[in-house]
Structure formats: structure tokens, C-alpha cells
């Protein structure tokens, strides 16, 4: 009997494991499920580690329930040859995950396996009825109802936190909450029902996995809510938005963000995990003491009931909620259980972004030295005389008069790409795959320039190196912390000092003219640095690198003081470099550009950091241009952006109009006023992925799967704001007319197609 028990356990384990591996095969192989015209990738968000774990976990759970349930409850162990079928299922599952099965063979066999499970289940039911031995009613099982309620509450809270980032009428907000409650009741109940079945039908020794899943679910929800509160970006989007090429490199992400997980950080993470595990055990014990029990079928009934109520609500919502309010539910969150579609925004457009003709640098007649400084996290309003006295005075006396200036995006790699290519950041993923030097570098190289790139940070973060510099074809000198790392000081500001020394050596080593120098300044990046040798303007500042979730006014002031101190140090660095150029007679005929890659929210909207929205705090950066003296200071400009850097440099080296007139931006020297384009796929705060800005008007657009990099072909207008606040429209045609009135130059410059979709009213 003991041997039979061991054998049954082994066969049960094989059936269970076979189900897991069979279910995971399409995910592991990255297949696309196709049924007629319907096609859905099993990896729904390639590169997002968290979504991958969730989808993989759901598939593995489903496979375990099918495989384990077939053996345990559906007659598999009573079937003649059942043990061989379990062995075959396990072997087949491993072969599929290994890649030894073609898709047609896999799907044909999968259909046969599902048929076998259904046939044995029906055989089991028929056998019981024939023997007049109906199955007894499943007894109520011990139920961790406290944890169930907590997870449900956290899911609803996580969803409804979005309302704090959006403008919603009371009716739209109340409806949103109702919809998310019904949605999460259905999801959590069906998930808990699946966990019950997993525990019930899994072999001994594996049932602890259900507890691990629930513990990680609790931890993930807490992290999602905490990060959303701190950053405006939850854990899900964090994992997705730092993926490049369908890959997520945690080490590069941490390096790029100056995040270091030392002993204290590791202990903190371990402590949090232990705390969650202890809390899980406590809720399990308390639920048992309270005598909480539940039949799994009850959970299934609750899930189905909530879903039916959701369908009724969505089908009748047009009776009390307007188009914008109904669309609020769809655009704010990714997961929906209703097939009813809402009309997006004020108007929907079919579009094709116009890809600029790549400049070649042909026809250049001048070779001034060009110095381009891209300063990390430099906000426009940081340039105040008491914080940045040099840059303020230099801007007002030597630089072109430019009014409001904008980054091309709200994240480092997107803004760098736009500044060096002259293309909107929606083209980033396309060019990332090409691995070709940026148009600016290629054009300057063709015009006879020597290109030198130096940074105190890294360039292989989110593939910035190959996206902007290719494989070095147009770069003569490249230095950053990744190259000879032992030669670099440990601190960011100390490395900035070393880079500036290298730049000075470069200046004195070569005669004037024909050199493009690109320098990245790292000090103002979170958590905002300056060296010990520097005397900051604020003696009182926030000392911890962990910013508070609920900061007091004093906390905010101290964090801003810390940021100001890092900007003040950067101001000193740039002053020293410009003085050096003047002392060596290399200043007058040089072109010098200073800008920030993006800004930073410092609790103006309730969040810290950047890469979460196209807010002014995250995208208004300085753009200071000192032209060669022979060209004059330049005419006044109302507003400008990163997209104007490439055409301005081509203009400075004497290229004909044909080299830059097709670019997204325009040369700034002649002055004028044009609309500005800002784009991103980092839009977790409000779902707005594209802004048009001109004067006091701002148009915000969005599109499906905005969090995935790439070019949409269907967008909608979420809002159009003017001097008096948001504009409202009675028809889609009225919305389009307003766009054409306030942004007359945007359509031809940025799109080859921009049309109202058929059926819009």
C-alpha cells in the first residue's frame, strides 16, 4: 500500500507538472494565438518582467489545476494507463518548453489533451451515477477571508488612486468607483477560486506555492500603491517602461537611476518580505480562529454575479454618464472585463507621423566649435540668480532671447534621442533597432567635424549607446564611467569634475574649429549631488536619499533646497568651463548650447521625480544658445524645444535650407514662433502621450497601449486647454477645427496624415 501511495504521488506530480509545462509552452516560446482575424500574443507586454510573471503564473496555475485535477478528481488515477498518460503529458510539456514541438503539432496535441481531460471527467461522473454513488457535496474549506478582504480592498484602492491624477466630474468619479469595485470583486473572487482549486488538486509538497502567490500578490499591491503615491507611477509601469528590445535589465535601470542596493537596502528588502510572510501567516491564523470557511463554488458565484452586474452597468451607463466620463474608465486603467467600448476623448484621428528626411551635412560652409551640454534633471525655473547666477547672467547677455523652452520628452533616453536626431520620441523604438549614429553626429562627421562624447554616467542604459552612437562609426572620442571604471571617482559630482578636466585637455590639445563636444552633467540627477569641496547656497537640506511619501511643507522645502544645491554646483562647473574657453581665446566663435534632458516634479502635483507625465514640471527645461559672434546673438523666439537643436546646429555650420527644412523642429537663429511637440510613452499619471503647445494653448492626445514605445496610427484628443481653462466641444468636427485654429503649423510639419475617423460626429 505504501508503495502504491508513493507511485500515486509520483504520477499525480507528473500529471500536475505536465499541465504546468503544457500551459507555459506558448508563453515560453513567445507564440501568438490566432483565431481567424483575431491575433493575441501570449506575452502581452514583452520585456515587462512583472507582467510576464503574472501571465506566466496564471498560465502555470491553470495548467496545474487541469493536470492535477484530471489525476485527482476527474478519474485520471483510475484510468487504465493513466500513469503512462501522466508521464507522456510531462514529457510533452518539457518538449514544448524546450522548443522541440512546432506550433501546429503543439496545438493539435493540446486540443487532444483538453479532449482527454473532458472525456475522463465525463466518464467519472457517469461512473458515479451508474454506481448510484453521487459525489458528496464539497464541504466548506478553511478560508483566509481576512486576507481576501484586504487584497480586494487594496485592488480597489490601487485602481481608484487614478482619480487623483485626472479631472473627473462627480458623476464620472462615482461611476468609475462602482465599475472598479465590480471589476475587482470579479477578478479577486475568480483568482481566489483558482487558488482554492490549486491547493485542492496539487500533490503534497507543492501546496505551499499558493501561499507564496498570495504573499507576492499582497507585496505587489503594496508596492504598486506606494510607488504610485510617491512617483505617480506604479510597479507595473515601472517594470514595463524600463524595458528595451523586449528585455528588462534591472542592473542597468538601477545604474541609470543612481540606485544602489547596499547591505542596508538588501536587509530592508528582506525585512519587508519577512514582514509580509508573517502578516500572511497571521491572517491565516486569525481567519481560522474566527472560523471562516467557504465553498469554492461560492466564490465562483460571486465572481459571475459581479461580472453580470458590471455588464448591466456598462450597457446602460450612457443614460447618466457623458462620452468623456465613460472614456475616463477605459483610458485610466489597462484591465477591463466589459466588451462595451467607449468613444475615446473629444475626437479620434487616423494619423501617420511624418518621418523627417535624414540630413547629410552636405554643403556646410563653416566649422565653429560646438559645445552641447545636456544637464540631468534641469528645470527651467531652477535658473534663478540666487541659485544659478552665472547661467542667468550668461542667458541675459550672451544667449539668444528665447521665451518658454521645452524638452522633447520626459525621460533621459527619449530626450537625448530627440535632441540628437531632430525626430519626435515616437520614432525612438524604430531607431533603437537600427543601431545607427544619430543624424546630427553623421551630418557633422560628413562636414569634417571631430565628434567627442563624454559623460560621468553610463550610455548603455536603455540602449542609449547604440541608439544614439551606433557602433562608433561617427564618434572619434567616447568616455564614460563604463570605460575604464576603476579610473573614475566614486561620486557623481566628483566624476563631473573629472569630465570637465578632460574637456579642458581636449580644448587645449587641438586648434579651434571643427570639433563637436557633447557633455552630460550628472550632478542634478536624483538624489541631487555636489562635492564636499563645494559650498552650497542652502545650508539646510534634506539629507536622506529616501523621499517621504507624505511630505510636510518643510520636507518639500528641504528637498528643493537639495535640488537647488546640485544646480548651483552645475552652474559653477559651467561658469568655470566658459571662463576657461575665454582665457584660451576659444569662446567668441564657438556655439554653446546648454539644456536639460527633462525636468522633475517636486510635489507640485503630489509626486516626486519624472518619467510619469508630460507636465510642465517634467518637460520645461532651459535651452540656452550662444551663437558664434559672427552670426550675432539671434532674433527673439517665443518658444523652442529639443527638436530645434539639430536644425539650429546645421544652420550654424552653414548648411543650406534643404538640410534642415524637413526636420520636426526649425533653426532658431532667425526667430519666429511655431508650435512645439512633446511626446512620450511614460504617461502613467494621466495617460497623455503627446502635447502640442503654442502660446497659452495646449492640446493633449493619447492612444491605445500608450505605455508601449512606438508610433500609433490612431490617436484621440483628450483635452484642449486655453487661457480660460479647458475647452469643451459639441462635436468632433468642432474639436478638429479648434486644433487647426490654434496650431495651424502642426499638421503639415508633424504628420503626413491627420484625419477624423469615419463615423465621428
Image: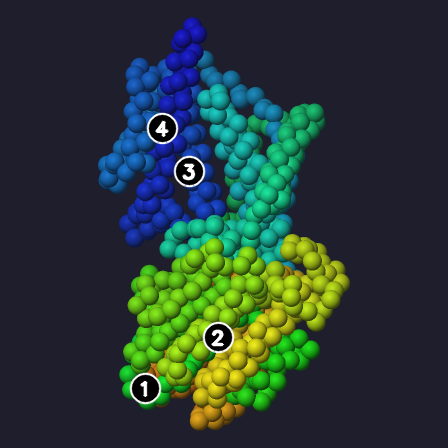
Q: Which mark is residue 364?
A: 1
- Which residue occupies 43% across, 51% down? 248
Q: Nearer the viewer, mark 4 or mark 1?
A: 1
Q: Position of residue 6 (x, y in %)?
A: 42, 13
Which label's residue is closer to the chain start, 2 or 1? 1
Q: Are marks 4 and 2 in contact (CB under 8 Å)?
A: no
Q: Position of residue 185 (x, y in %)?
A: 57, 43
Which label's residue is closer to the chain start, 3 or 1? 3
Res. 684 in view: no
Which label's residue is closer to the chain start, 4 or 1? 4
Most extreme residue toward the top is 1
Q: Are marks 3 and 1 in contact (CB under 8 Å)?
A: no
Answer with left or right where residue 131 lies relative to residue 180: left
> Disc 2 and disc 3: Cα gap in Å?
58 Å
Q: Are marks 2 and 3 in contact (CB under 8 Å)?
A: no
Q: Which mark is residue 18?
A: 4
Q: Examine the image and state in which quarter residue 387 appears.
A: bottom right
Q: Residues within 10 Å of mark 3 (few under 14, many from 20)?
A: many
- Which residue occupies 54% across, 33% down? 212
> Disc 4 and disc 2: Cα gap in Å?
65 Å
Q: Would you name the residue on which mark 3 appears? A: 59
Q: Residues within 10 Å of mark 1 (few under 14, many from 20)?
A: many
In the rendered view, would you say 515 is above or below 614?
below
Where is the C terminus found, in terms of image quarters? bottom left
> Disc 4 and disc 1: Cα gap in Å?
67 Å
Q: Would you name the residue on which mark 2 appears? A: 504
Q: Are marks 2 and 1 in contact (CB under 8 Å)?
A: no
Q: Nearer the viewer, residue 162 or 129?
A: 162
Q: Nearer the viewer, mark 2 or mark 1?
A: 2
In the rendered view, would you say 463 is above or below 278?
below
> Disc 4 and disc 3: Cα gap in Å?
12 Å
Amino acid at each position: 500500500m505504501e508503495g502504491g501511495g508513493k507511485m500515486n504521488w509520483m504520477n499525480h506530480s507528473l500529471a500536475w507538472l505536465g499541465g504546468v509545462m503544457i500551459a507555459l509552452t506558448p508563453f515560453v516560446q513567445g507564440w501568438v494565438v490566432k483565431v481567424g482575424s483575431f491575433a493575441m500574443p501570449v506575452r502581452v507586454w514583452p520585456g515587462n518582467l512583472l507582467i510576464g510573471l503574472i501571465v506566466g503564473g496564471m498560465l502555470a496555475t491553470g495548467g496545474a489545476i487541469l493536470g492535477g485535477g484530471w489525476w485527482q478528481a476527474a478519474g485520471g488515477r483510475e484510468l487504465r494507463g493513466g500513469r503512462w498518460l501522466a508521464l507522456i503529458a510531462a514529457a510533452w510539456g518539457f518538449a514544448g518548453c524546450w522548443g522541440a514541438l512546432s506550433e501546429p503539432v503543439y496545438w493539435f496535441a493540446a486540443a487532444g489533451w483538453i479532449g482527454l481531460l473532458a472525456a475522463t471527467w465525463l466518464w467519472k461522473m457517469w461512473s458515479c451515477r451508474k454506481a448510484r454513488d453521487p459525489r458528496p457535496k464539497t464541504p466548506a474549506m478553511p478560508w483566509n477571508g481576512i486576507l481576501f478582504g484586504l487584497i480586494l480592498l487594496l485592488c480597489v484602492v490601487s485602481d481608484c488612486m487614478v482619480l487623483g491624477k485626472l479631472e473627473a466630474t462627480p458623476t464620472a468619479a462615482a461611476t468609475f468607483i462602482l465599475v472598479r469595485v465590480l471589476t475587482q470583486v470579479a477578478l479577486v473572487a475568480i483568482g481566489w477560486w483558482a487558488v482554492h482549486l490549486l491547493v485542492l488538486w496539487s500533490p503534497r509538497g507543492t501546496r505551499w506555492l499558493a501561499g507564496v502567490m498570495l504573499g507576492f500578490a499582497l507585496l505587489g499591491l503594496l508596492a504598486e500603491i506606494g510607488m504610485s503615491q510617491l512617483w505617480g507611477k506604479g510597479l507595473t509601469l515601472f517594470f514595463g517602461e524600463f524595458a528595451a528590445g523586449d528585455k528588462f535589465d534591472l542592473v542597468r535601470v538601477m545604474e541609470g537611476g543612481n540606485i544602489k542596493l547596499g547591505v542596508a537596502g538588501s536587509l530592508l528588502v528582506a525585512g519587508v518580505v519577512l514582514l509580509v510572510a508573517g502578516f500572511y501567516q497571521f491572517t491565516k491564523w486569525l481567519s481560522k480562529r474566527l472560523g471562516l470557511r467557504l465553498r469554492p463554488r461560492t466564490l465562483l458565484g460571486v465572481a459571475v454575479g459581479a461580472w453580470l452586474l458590471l455588464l448591466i452597468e456598462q450597457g446602460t451607463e450612457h443614460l447618466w454618464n457623458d462620452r468623456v466620463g465613460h472614456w475616463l474608465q477605459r483610458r485610466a486603467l489597462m484591465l477591463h472585463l466589459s466588451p462595451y467600448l467607449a468613444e475615446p476623448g473629444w475626437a479620434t484621428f487616423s494619423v501617420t507621423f511624418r518621418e523627417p528626411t535624414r540630413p547629410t551635412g552636405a554643403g556646410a560652409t563653416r566649422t565653429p566649435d560646438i559645445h552641447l551640454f545636456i544637464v540631468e534633471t534641469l528645470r527651467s525655473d531652477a535658473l534663478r540668480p540666487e541659485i544659478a547666477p552665472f547661467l542667468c547672467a550668461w542667458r541675459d547677455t550672451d544667449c539668444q532671447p528665447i521665451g518658454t523652452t521645452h524638452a522633447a520628452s520626459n525621460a533621459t533616453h527619449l530626450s537625448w534621442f530627440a535632441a540628437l536626431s531632430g525626430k519626435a520620441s515616437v520614432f525612438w523604438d524604430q531607431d533603437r533597432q537600427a543601431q545607427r549614429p544619430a543624424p546630427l553626429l553623421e551630418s557633422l562627421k560628413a562636414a569634417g567635424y571631430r565628434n567627442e562624447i563624454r559623460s560621468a554616467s553610463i550610455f548603455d542604459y536603455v540602449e542609449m549607446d547604440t541608439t544614439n552612437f551606433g557602433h562608433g562609426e561617427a564618434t572619434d572620442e567616447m568616455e564614460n564611467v563604463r570605460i575604464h571604471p576603476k579610473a573614475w571617482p566614486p561620486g557623481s559630482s566628483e566624476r563631473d569634475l573629472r569630465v570637465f578636466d578632460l574637456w579642458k585637455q581636449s580644448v587645449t590639445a587641438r586648434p579651434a574649429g571643427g570639433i563637436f563636444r557633447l557633455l552630460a552633467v550628472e550632478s542634478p540627477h536624483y538624489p541631487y549631488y555636489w562635492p564636499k569641496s563645494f559650498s552650497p547656497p542652502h545650508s539646510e537640506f534634506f539629507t536622506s536619499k529616501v523621499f517621504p511619501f507624505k511630505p510636510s511643507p518643510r520636507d518639500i522645502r528641504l528637498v528643493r533646497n537639495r535640488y537647488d544645491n546640485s544646480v548651483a554646483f552645475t552652474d559653477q562647473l559651467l561658469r568655470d568651463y566658459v571662463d576657461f574657453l575665454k582665457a584660451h581665446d576659444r569662446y567668441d566663435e564657438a556655439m554653446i548650447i546648454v539644456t536639460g534632458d527633462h525636468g522633475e516634479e517636486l510635489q507640485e502635483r503630489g509626486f516626486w521625480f519624472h518619467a510619469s507625465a508630460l507636465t510642465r514640471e517634467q518637460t520645461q527645461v532651459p535651452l540656452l544658445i550662444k551663437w558664434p559672434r559672427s552670426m550675432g546673438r539671434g532674433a527673439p523666439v517665443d518658444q523652442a524645444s529639443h527638436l530645434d537643436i539639430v536644425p539650429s546646429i546645421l544652420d550654424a555650420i552653414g548648411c543650406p535650407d534643404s538640410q534642415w527644412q524637413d526636420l520636426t523642429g526649425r533653426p532658431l537663429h532667425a526667430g519666429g514662433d511655431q508650435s512645439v511637440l512633446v511626446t512620450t510613452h511614460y504617461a502613467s499619471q494621466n495617460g497623455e502621450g503627446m502635447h502640442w503647445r503654442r502660446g497659452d494653448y495646449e492640446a493633449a492626445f493619447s492612444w491605445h497601449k500608450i505605455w508601449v514605445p512606438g508610433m500609433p496610427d490612431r490617436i484621440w484628443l483628450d483635452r484642449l486647454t486655453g487661457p480660460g481653462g479647458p475647452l469643451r466641444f459639441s462635436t468632433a468636427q468642432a474639436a478638429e477645427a479648434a486644433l487647426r485654429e490654434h496650431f495651424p503649423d502642426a499638421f503639415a510639419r508633424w504628420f503626413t496624415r491627420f484625419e477624423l475617423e469615419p463615423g465621428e460626429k
